[in-house]
Amino acid sequence: MSLEVWDRPEAAPQPSAPAAPVPRSRRRRLLVTAAAVLALLLLVLGALAMRGRGGNSEPLDPDNPGPDGAQAIARVLESRGVTVDIARSQSDLLDLEAPGSDTTVVVTSTDRLSEQTAVTAWERSGGAHRIVLVEPAGFLLQSLDLQVDPSDGTAATRSVRAGCTIDGVAPTDTISTLGGTYTSGRPSATACFTFEGSSSLVRLAPGTSGRGSAGSPETVVLGAGDSLANGEITRHDNAGVAVRLLGQGERLVWYIPAYLDVATQDTTPTSEVPRALAPLLFLVLFALLATMLWRGRRFGPLVSEPLPAVVKAIETTQSRGRLYRRAGDAARAGTILRVATVRRLATFLGLPAGSHAGVVAEAAARATGRPPAHVHALLGGLPPRDEREMIALANDLSTLEKEVHRP
């Protein structure tokens, strides 16, 4: 007895032989990785160089046109004939011509100064007419022996009148008071823009402040640093006060300290520890990206993995036939044969998938010319009771399929 009559599953496609992996050139991979790392390094160095030159994002930078920059006041001063020299590091400050009696020195980003860099900048600016320190911390004020103390918190109001008279500030001037406030016990100190005992501006007379007081310039401690920013310069009297404070002479030296100026052994304020985390995290991220590019692998072509065993379709059919025969379940085997035949006939006759056996029987009867009742009994009759009837049913179903396929 042929075992093919027990079931006729579709023949499974033979798996193709696994494709041989395409060899990859180690030298080419190393060159590509090195080029990627070099490009990333150049990008980082370019960003650092832009940052070192101030770029367009440095707070209170004369070349920054953003809301927190100070380009507006710098351009106004230049239009009034004031020469604006920018020093973005201590070496730039030392390279510039020493400030004279016609020069005002303004120091922003004062939180980047250490004790040594602050003293060096103070000594370099000793011949200036006025030094303006913008939002200096208590550490810096102590290092320069200015006897000005920062107050706790910030001003409780966005604007306040000056209430004082100094060179550049009138009693009726009003400025934005966003920033720090200060107090001073020096008799020669003049407090302006005072609210509840704390002032946004403290002026120390020349020759009475800082290291070497005998020859020290006039010193202005400005806590309202935002009054110089582009986003606030048009509010209240910010512009007028800023022009008069910074434009007293023919020259303005704008000093923006850099973190890299601070030596390892130099004394820095404790508040600088969190600020150092950002550069460290940046270096860690760069090292991580470099490691990923160095050790990373590109996805190559897909390679078919050989299976543990390949079973041919005929072997599957024979195995299932032996199982059915051992079980002796002729009725189940006959049902499976009828279902498979109905499915194949429906496909060949163009009927919808899942068509009922009666619909398939009508179409098969028309295609073969057989009596419909005979085809109905063949496709949907009683199941076979034994092996002999099952074999007869298999042969009849095979014959019906051949007649339907016959042209």
Image (cartoon, grey):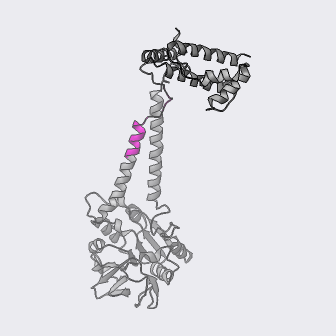
Q: How many circles with numbers are drawn on the protein? A: 0
Q: Position of residue 380 (x, y in %)?
A: 60, 25
Above or below, 387 relative to 184: above
The C terminus lies in quadrant: top right
Q: Is residue 295 magenta?
A: yes
Q: Position of residue 350 (x, y in %)?
A: 69, 28
Q: Position of residue 3 (x, y in %)?
A: 51, 12
Magenta stretch, residue numbers: 287-303
Q: Is residue 352 left or right of residue 283?
A: right
* Closer to us: 315 or 396: 396
Which quadrant of the figure has residue 143?
Answer: bottom left
Q: Is residue 91 left or right of residue 364?
A: left
Residue 187 makes an appearance in the image: yes
Above or below, 193 relative to 233: below
Looking at the image, the residue that sits furthest to the top is 1
Residue 15 makes an appearance in the image: no
* Closer to us: 355 or 150: 355
For image coordinates 44% across by 46% down, the residue present is 41
Q: Is residue 194 left or right of residue 366?
A: left
Q: Is residue 282 magenta?
A: no
For image coordinates 56% across by 75% down, the residue present is 79
Q: Position of residue 20 (x, y in %)?
A: 49, 21
Which quadrant of the figure has residue 27?
Answer: top left
* Closer to us: 349 or 107: 349
